[in-house]
Structures are given as structure tokens and as C-alpha cells.
Image (spheres, rainbow, N blue to C red):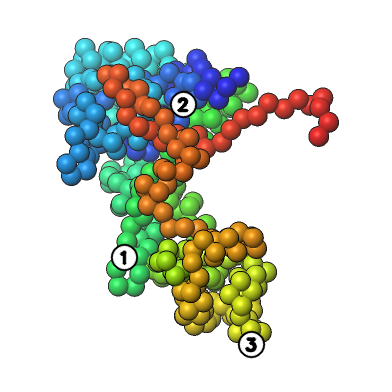
Amino acid sequence: MELKEVLKGLRVVELASVLAGPLAGSFLAELGAEVVKIENGPAGGDVTRAWKLEGEVGINNASAYYHSANYGKKVVMCDLKSETDKAIIYSYIKDCDVVLTNYQKATAEKLGIALDWIKKINSDAIIVQLNAFEYDDPRPGYDLVMQAESGFISMCGDREHLAKMPVAMIDIIAAHQIKEAVLLGILQKKMTGKANIFHVSLYKSALSALVNQGTNYLMENHVAQPIGTLHPNIAPYGEVILTSDNLPIMLAVGSDGQFEKLAGIFGWNKSKLDMFATNQMRLKHRQALQIELLESAKNLPSSKLMYLLDEEKVPYARVKNMKDVFSDPQSFSMVLNNPVADRSDGKYISNIAFTMADFDSNESH
């Protein structure tokens, strides 16, 4: 069985807009589910249809942003205040297996698509409700709000200029939580016969992604500061050096052994190596370390430096722009044509970043 057929036969109704819910719906569609996306017709549909770049024409008047999160769905434009259209929505809900919704509680109750209504229409449906904070909290929750409220913006940029992450990362993290809820719901229903309601919070999704920055505070009372690309626990990790042909190379040295190999590439003597021998010493003398790294790299052409780093297995990265990224065949292999309801095709980056291999247990390995 191919990945695109794993969820064949699963019927999904998407009452969600913007990014987190639609991304989860797209993931299910890529795996073969039949996803019906209900959009608010009188309002012009999903608000992201109008989120165009300056000068962007769009496909059938829908933005590239919209296409990033709406792969392979059947789109139905409805007037949610019309009883006739509401009956159409109810008919889809009645026959589905999964409902994804991000309507705020008060709005959903006003429109007749609150959770209790959905359960009344289809008690066998797995429902995933996306909330900004909690279900009863009326505050709206755009990704930017969550980046600020959960501490991410306080750690991005530098001390003079705060920055946000350049994609709606909290929405993306929440989309993964939604997908996990759906898959757990399918498993649970198979085991118990019961279809549950799952609540996913943008805010809690953001908190769950704080990982080491959160535990740095919880365990050591360390309040992370904005330090650009640098890592608070490792050095040189995030430091950028320039080669003789001005190619920016970002280092990602994660161990003392890797650093010793880096120092060998640059021909550092024992006294210089001893000054930066351990990770904690490198963190303490980070500014001096960066000066030495820049001085050592400036006389090496990028081709030679990358060859040496590869040979010694020292982790690094070229700092690529979008054109560079999608010139890589491995990256471009994830680009799909995105069929939408009007049959116009947009470009879409696959939600699926894994492969599935057949395994014959009778083979010796």
C-alpha cells in the first residue's frame, strides 16, 4: 500500500481556516482521506485567500499562502447564516468520520456548529477543536500573539531588535498536535468503539515546543535572551563565518570532539585549542572564539573549507535563500501540484516528510 492510500475511505469535514487546522486537513488529504473544506462564502472564503504578496496575482484569486495549507480538498462555499446552506454542512458532518474545527465557542454556538451540535448530528465522529487558549476563552489567537505570549519573540533577534519566526511556527506545531489527536482518535475508536472530542490549544502547543529553553528556566532559573542564531547551550553553534569568496557558513558543532577536528582544520596550536577545549569554556569566551573563527576562515575558499568539514564530519550549513533551497533536487522532490476545487493548480510543499518501506519479517537482516 502506498502512503497516499493509507487513509483512503476516511471522510473529513474541515471547519477551519488560516493555517493550523487547514494544514492538518492537508496532511490527511495527502494520505488519501476525502477532505471537505467548508468556507464562509459571503466573507470571501478562508481569509488567507487574500493574503497575497505585494504584486501577487494568485491562482483563481487565491494566494500562495492559501495554497500552502489546502492540498487536495473539496472546497464548499457556504453562507453559515443560511438555513439552506447549514443543512448542506450538516449533511457532510452526518456522513463523516472526522471533524476539524477552529470556531470560537461563542461564534460556533451562534452559527449552530458548536461541539454539542456536531455530536448530536454525528455521535460517531472524532472531533478536534482548535482553541487559541482554552475553549471558553474568547481571546483570538493569531500565531504572532502566541509567539509573543509563549516567550518565543523574547528569544528571537538580538538585544536591539526583537524578531518573530519567519513562518507561523506555532500554527505548524499545533497542526502536528491536531494530526496526532486525529490519529489517536482513530486508534482509540478502533479499540473502544468510542469517538472522542479532542481540544488542541495554540498556546499550549507553543509551550510544549519550548523544550530546552523551558527547562533551562525551570531547572536553572535561566531567562533566555535574544542572541540571534546562537545556541544558549552550545558553541560554536549558530556562529556564521565568511570564507575568502564571501560564502556564509554556519557552524553547528555539538561536541568537544567535533570542535577539536574544527581546530585541526584551521591549524590552531595547542594553547589556542586549550583556551576553548570544553563547551563551557567556549560559551564563556564566545566573543573571542568568534574572532578566531572569522580570522581563520577568511583565507579559505568555500570549496576547500566545505571539503575539509565534510571529510572531518564537522556539522555545518550553507545559509541558503528560498531559490537555493528549491534548486536542490532533494527539496524539490517534496513539491506537489495542488489540485483545488476550481481545478487550478498551485505549488504545495508536502506535509509528509517520511517514507514507508515494506518489511519482510522472513528475510534475514
> Which SS class for mark 3?
helix
Q: Residues within 10 Å of mark 1 (few under 14, many from 20)?
A: some
State left or right for residue 9 relative to residue 358: left
The one of 27 and 241 positioned closer to us in this rendering: 241
- Report, in whole angstroms, how far the alpha carbon at label 3 lies from the one at label 2: 56 Å
First in residue order: circle 3 vs circle 2: 2
Q: Is residue 282 left or right of residue 17?
A: right
Residue at 41% in and 12% down: 95
Name the secondary structure under disc 2. Answer: helix
- Mark 3 against mark 1, which lies toward the viewer? 3
Q: In this view, does 26 lie above or below 285?
A: above
User: Helix or strand or loop: what does disc 1 sit on?
Assistant: loop
The percent coordinates of residue 259 (x first, y second) are: 62, 71
Q: Which amino acid does label 3 sit on?
A: Ser
Q: How far apart are marks 1 and 2 (CA)?
A: 36 Å
Position of 219 with respect to 48 (left or right) is right
Disc 3: which residue: 271
Query: Which residue bears the numbered disc 1?
Result: 162
Residue 213 % position (x, y): 49, 63
**Amino acid type shown at disc 2:** Glu
Disc with the residue nearer the chain's start (1 vs 2) = 2
Q: Which mark is residue 30?
A: 2
- Mark 3 crowd level (few <14, some 14–19, many ≥20, 10 Å Cα): few
